[in-house]
Image: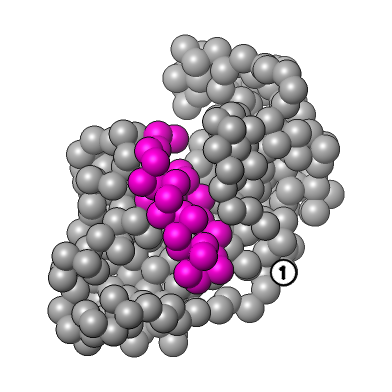
Amino acid sequence: MLIPNPIINQVLDHPLLEEKDVELSIKRLDLIHDLVPGNKFFKLKYNLEKATKENKNTLLTFGGAFSNHIHAVANAAHSMGLKAIGVIRGEKTFPLNPTLSDAKAKGMRLHYISRSQYREKTEEYFIQELHQLFGDFYLIPEGGTNQEAIQGTQEILQKEDEVYSHIALSIGTGGTFLGIFQACQIQQKALGFSSLKGNFIQKEIEELSEKYSIQTPKHYQIFTEYHFGGYANYDQSLIEFIWWFYENFGIVLDPVYTGKMFFGLWDLIKKGYFPKGSKVLAIHTGGIQGNRGFTFQTGIKLPSL
Ligand SMILES: *Cc1c(COP(=O)(O)O)cnc(C)c1O
């Protein structure tokens, strides 16, 4: 099993927070594990346990070429003495980007499939084909969202976190949001910031809640206007914000998830969204490994570790 570091909630100091009478803390999941940081630690936790219980010696999962999930699965498998297969969307390109090069160094076998094949990845016939190629494996879905992941992400919020009025986090597939939402207290409000373009995420969250029988009588709000053009898109203001955040607080954000979430959160604070006396807990879901890949692809420098 992977042993987590203690979870820290760090209070942020800034004149704007004083002016608005808002307390802002950041839950540093980016520090929870050296090799498997962020929300992926919690999403994988019970999947790894289940794979072990089922005596599987290979994990297979899917992802894009810069995926935090692929990176986390490669590291987790390596740490636990399991084999890993990463089914990667798109063609193989040389040199390997930092994410895939790390995954390969950790022994992950990389299997590239076309974008059209990738869309078939949840079809039974396609999984059967993968079994013919690779034999027995424990399958973790793309982005890692399944029952076990939602069970794990509920553990992100702890007893001490009941004091916060708002819990803010980034949304990709929504698995982490659902776990956190499930763990929220009745008086707390969960704020999700979607990294993907479009309003479908609201419906997706409702469907996932139903699928995983999550009771959602509590308050939540999903913001769909801070995606910067869509998943993996960005603009100069986002890059500047990430640098500004790093210079002010010494905390590294990524341009895909946490940068957009904090940009949105800071914008809401400026606009007076939060009632005076609000205590906001923002979840740093990790993703820093991707900063090297971003620079690799765009040439734009970002803070990194
Ligand atoms: C994967 C990831 C997310 C999205 O998590 P979901 O459970 O898919 O919504 C958010 N932040 C970071 C840094 C991630 O790596």
Tell which of 298 and 268 is nearer to you: 298
In the rendered image, is residue 157 in sight?
yes
**Where is 296 relative to 49, above or below?**
above
Q: Where is residue 191 in the image (x, y as percent from the top left)?
A: 27, 62
**Where is 129 relative to 48, above or below?**
above
Q: Where is residue 72 in the image (x, y as percent from the top left)?
A: 65, 48
Tell me which segment is drawn in magenta: 232-260
Residue 234 magenta-drawn?
A: yes
Point 74% across, 48% down: residue: 75
Q: Quadrant of the C terminus?
A: bottom right
Tell which of 241 and 113 is nearer to you: 241
Task: Say what amino acid the circle numbered 1 marks.
Answer: Ile
In the rendered image, is residue 53 in sight?
no
Tell whether 231 sits left or right of 103.
left
Q: Position of residue 89 (x, y in %)?
A: 56, 22
Point 24% across, 69% down: residue: 269
Tell which of 181 and 7 is nearer to you: 7
| Residue 162 found in image quarter | bottom left
Say which residue label 1 marks: 3
**Where is 74 relative to 158, above or below?**
above
Point 62% across, 14% down: residue: 91
Tell whether 65 sits left or right of 98.
left
Residue 220 magenta-drawn?
A: no
| Residue 277 found in image quarter | bottom left
